[in-house]
Amino acid sequence: AGMTPDQLGAVGVTMGPGLEICLRVGYRAAAALATAHGLPFVSVHHLEAHVLTARQFEPSLRFPFLVLLVSGGHCQILLA
């Protein structure tokens, strides 16, 4: 993203469910970055993160909304 740690307000990382090894690698890297720079550390539910990205691309999207979540072994139709 072309940012330096002093430009960050916090470090966020997704947690399970998901592929445990992949999530663990990301978690450890994010925790190390937050600790090294004295930043708040925020964990986010992995599948919620996928669902909520819809709002990044469509800011006018309001709750509740219907979403098809297809992420590896997690395939669901949800009301968010």
Image (cartoon, rainbow, N blue to C red):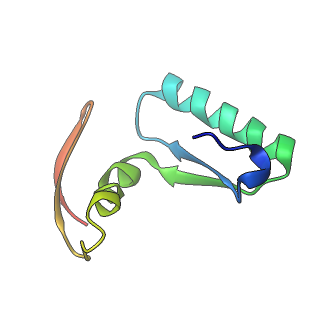
57 and 48: which is toward the camera: 57
Image quarter where the C terminus lies is bottom left
User: Seen in the image, is 24 located left or right of residue 10?
Assistant: left
Residue 77 in the image: x percent, y percent? 14, 53
Residue 53 in the image: x percent, y percent? 34, 54
What residue appears at the point 29 percent right and 58 percent down from the top-left corner? 57
User: Seen in the image, is 30 located left or right of residue 47?
Assistant: right
Residue 38 in the image: x percent, y percent? 85, 51
Would you place residue 1 above or below residue 80 in this image? above
User: Seen in the image, is 36 located left or right of residue 52?
Assistant: right
**Rendered image quadrant of residue 62:** bottom left
61 and 74: which is toward the camera: 61
What residue appears at the point 19 percent right and 59 percent down from the top-left corner? 78
4 and 14: which is toward the camera: 4
Residue 19 in the image: x percent, y percent? 42, 27
What is the number of callouts on the image?
A: 0
Would you place residue 49 above or below residue 73 in this image? below
Image quarter where the N terminus lies is top right
What residue appears at the point 40 percent right and 52 percent down from the top-left corner? 49
What residue appears at the point 76 percent right and 45 percent down from the top-left corner? 5
Residue that lies at the very extreme toward the front in this rendered image? 2
